[in-house]
Image (spheres, grey):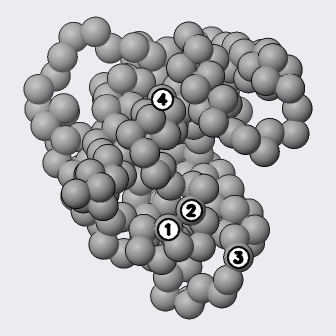
Amino acid sequence: MTSLASYPRLILWTERPHQLWFLTLTLAWASFILWSFVFAWHSKYTQRPVLVVRTNLRLWGIATVAGLIGASVLARFIDPVLRPLVPDDYPATVESWLAMTLFLLAFDQLFLCLAPFAFFLRLSHRPGIAASLTVLFGVFLVYLKARAWPGQFSPAFILELFAWRVVAGFLSVSFFLKGGALLTMGWIFLLQLRHLIYIWTVAN
């Protein structure tokens, strides 16, 4: 299912280094391993399910508010700086937005939050330590990505970027612990809606 949801993003990747079938199989294999981490260790050490079926309106309300505030912060402080420098990281059409959003929800969150948290939980057996290490892992990836971006960034912007990654990381892990993977994906989806609004605004 993860590979199927990520497939449109692979199709739109015009500069992919390998054949589409090879990338799809690689993604399927990686997804299988990462989900194995999640289902093997998350419930064992947290006593909470990975997928929560019962709806908790209070948690979803908090996630909705966090998503809307986070989208506003990104649209105001982060996107105006990065969009001109790395336009390929931002969707330009509704189709590309859908492809990027599906990939972000299906694989990106698995790689950045769910699987690392389960892995660090297996090592530490303590959710607090696992959450902190998961956030640090996300900050490290942002650091590597920022080094590859063209142009120079002010120290203030770098601090804003890292601060956002820390806050978003802790929120994602917290939502995962309290409401399962679907709640984590739900708040990330709200963040992605800012791109759709921007596309419609530019088009009109």
Task: Work out how far the residue at label 4 is from the one at label 2, CA to CA, in angstroms.
Answer: 18 Å
Q: Residues within 10 Å of mark 1 (few under 14, many from 20)?
A: few
Q: Earlier in the sequence, mark 3 or mark 2?
A: 2
Question: Mark 4 falls on what kind of element?
Answer: helix
Amino acid beneath label 2: Pro
Question: Mark 2 falls on what kind of element?
Answer: helix
Residue linked to disc 4 = 102
Residue linked to disc 2 = 87
- Is residue 165 in view? yes
Q: Is residue 6 left or right of residue 143?
A: left
For the residues labelled 3 and 4, say whether their Cβ atoms are less than 8 Å apart: no
* Front: mark 3 or 2: 2
For the residues labelled 2 and 1, say whether their Cβ atoms are less than 8 Å apart: yes
Residue linked to disc 1 = 83
Residue linked to disc 3 = 150
Q: Position of residue 195 (x, y in %)?
A: 36, 52
- Could you tell me which residue is drawn at 53 percent across and 20 percent down? 5
